[in-house]
Image (cartoon, rainbow, N blue to C red):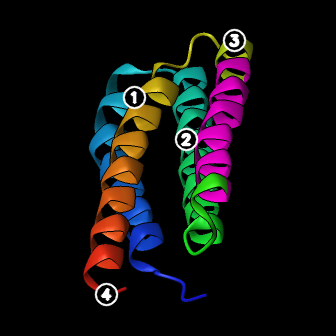
Amino acid sequence: MSINRNYPLQVCLVLVILAAAAAYPVARYGTGDMAIAAAVGALLSTVNALAGYLTIEYSFERSHTTFLKAVLGGMGVRMVLMLGALLFSIKVVSLLSFYVVYLAMEILFLQKRATSRSQNP
């Protein structure tokens, strides 16, 4: 199993860029609680994105059935866990925004892996 490290690096780069972009508005107009909420949301979403990456890497070379169970089931489980975290911290808007960005990145990564697999059987 070859591990593609580009996706985790992209996730970390997006995290750094979005954190830098949010730093001034949160520091200028936000409160300490808002900063903590944004950081927790970013952390949960980043962990979620990396868990999706690990699921794809684990299941990519396996049978189609195993792949679909792992990826789709993993998305379902992670979505329920994220919903629980959202309900736990309902004030955290950044949680949902990071989740959407990373989910889009995960879908693009999956498509890129599938394309490379079809070109290199």
Pointer 4 residue: 120
Which of labels 1 and 4 is toward the front? 4
Mark number, residue 45: 2
Q: Is residue 56 above or below residue 81?
A: below
Question: Residue 98: x percent and y percent?
Answer: 43, 37
Mark number, residue 97: 1
Q: Is residue 25 above or below residue 103?
A: above
Pointer 3 residue: 87
Mark 1, secondary structure of its residue: helix
Q: Residue at x 47, y 35 (%)?
A: 99
Q: Residues within 10 Å of mark 1 (few under 14, many from 20)?
A: some
Mark 3, secondary structure of its residue: helix
Q: Residue at x 57, y 58 (%)?
A: 64
Looking at the image, which is closer to me, 25 or 76?
A: 76
Q: What amino acid does circle 2 point to?
A: Ser
Which of labels 3 and 4 is toward the front? 4
- Indicate whether residue 77 is drawn in magenta: yes
Which badge, 2 or 1, is on the more N-terminal residue? 2
Q: What amino acid does circle 4 point to?
A: Asn
Looking at the image, which is closer to me, 112 or 118?
A: 118
Q: What amino acid does circle 3 point to?
A: Leu
Q: Dividing the image into 4 quarters, which one contains the N terminus? A: bottom right
